[in-house]
Amino acid sequence: MAPSVLVRPGTLADAETLIRVGYAAYRDDHITHAKFPEHLRRKYGMTEEMAWRLRTMKRALAAEDGDQAEKKKKTAHVVVAVLRSGEGDDEREDVAGWAIWREPAQPNAKPGASAPEKEKKDEDELPPSMDKEVAARFDAAMVALARRHLGETYDQEYWMLQVLAVDPKFHRRGVGKALVQWGVEHAFRAGRDVQLTASPAGRLLYLSQGFEVVAEETHHGAVCSLMVKRRKRDGD
Ligand SMILES: CC(C)(COP(=O)(O)OP(=O)(O)OC[C@H]1O[C@@H](n2cnc3c(N)ncnc32)[C@H](O)[C@@H]1OP(=O)(O)O)[C@@H](O)C(=O)NCCC(=O)NCCS
């Protein structure tokens, strides 16, 4: 049987696995290395960083696991891709990747108030291996890029792919594509277009999925591509 990819909501039980997959996926990512430079990781070690990643992930997953009232308010979706392979006794399931998709912010929220603004609340808990100034500057640059090209209230209009991580062991098996399709389908069903900022690795995947590049900027040696996928309008 050819491996098949199943996309499902993440649960609290996935937290450790998702951190491991995320760490492996972003191992060679330039922006991750700028935000968590080698000299700080060497000086402070990885313990606090991993604990912070786990805390943040558990918080996102707790909302996913929440009761109906919580779910109604929830605008971030942690989705997990499971790769199924083999048959009978050889059947196995591997958590191969995950994504965080964000619905548009409420109209009364400040522009840009979704991801980076929200993360500021965690500022006092940020790990010592993070270069906080670099991280804040980069996040602000990405918000400014999106505002410039998609409008001041872009985050009230578009669904956004915030994180996409696929375990390198499972690259090129359609896992990233399945996680992208999940969000695009949900956004389009809700009558919304989709936007994201792509890493060089992600850019090729999004192009293959019909996204177009709106603008590009180079940061820390990596081309960051603002990309959108728009639903078909009448007359298209
Ligand atoms: C980008 C990433 C998510 C792709 O995941 P993936 O599961 O390997 O991608 P898929 O197998 O679904 O790829 C679907 C299509 O995208 C394109 N594609 C994906 N990776 C590619 C690569 N390295 N080179 C060329 N094309 C690529 C291909 O068209 C591919 O179809 P094909 O395999 O039939 O040719 C993965 O490489 C990753 O986690 N990278 C590190 C983290 C990261 O940069 N995330 C994106 C943040 S914006």
Image (cartoon, grey):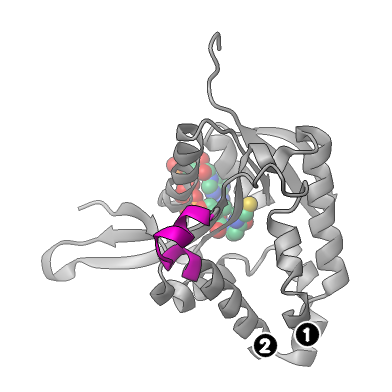
Q: Residue 229 got which mark? A: none
Magenta stretch containing residue 67, yes or no?
A: yes
Q: Report x, y in % for residue 62.
A: 48, 71
Which amino acid type corresponds to the residue marked 1 in the rendered image? Pro
Which amino acid type corresponds to the residue marked 2 in the rendered image? Glu
Q: Quadrant of residue 236?
A: top right
Residue 183 position (above or below residue 68)? above
Residue 191 position (above or below residue 95)? above
* Closer to us: 112 or 220: 112
Q: Which residue is located at x 79 percent, y 58 percent?
A: 139
Q: Which residue is located at x 47 percent, y 78 percent?
A: 16
Residue contact between numbered discs 1 and 2, judged by CB atoms under 8 Å: yes
Crowdedness near tag 1: few (<14), some (14–19) or many (≥20) residues, C-alpha within 10 Å: some
Question: Which element is circle 2 on?
Answer: helix
Mark 1 or 2, nearer chain start: 2
Q: Report x, y in % for residue 183.
A: 49, 44
Residue 103 position (above or below residue 76)? above
Residue furthest to the left: 88
Residue 94 position (above or below residue 142)? below
Question: Which element is circle 1 on?
Answer: loop
Q: What's the magenta region?
A: 62-74
User: Is 176 situated left or right of 102 in this image?
Assistant: left
Crowdedness near tag 2: few (<14), some (14–19) or many (≥20) residues, C-alpha within 10 Å: some
The residue where tag 1 is placed is 128
Q: Residue 48 got which mark? A: 2
Q: Taking the image as drawn, is residue 228 in sight?
A: yes
Q: Report x, y in % for residue 57.
A: 55, 72
CA separation in Å, label 1 and label 2: 7 Å
Q: Report x, y in % for residue 15.
A: 47, 75
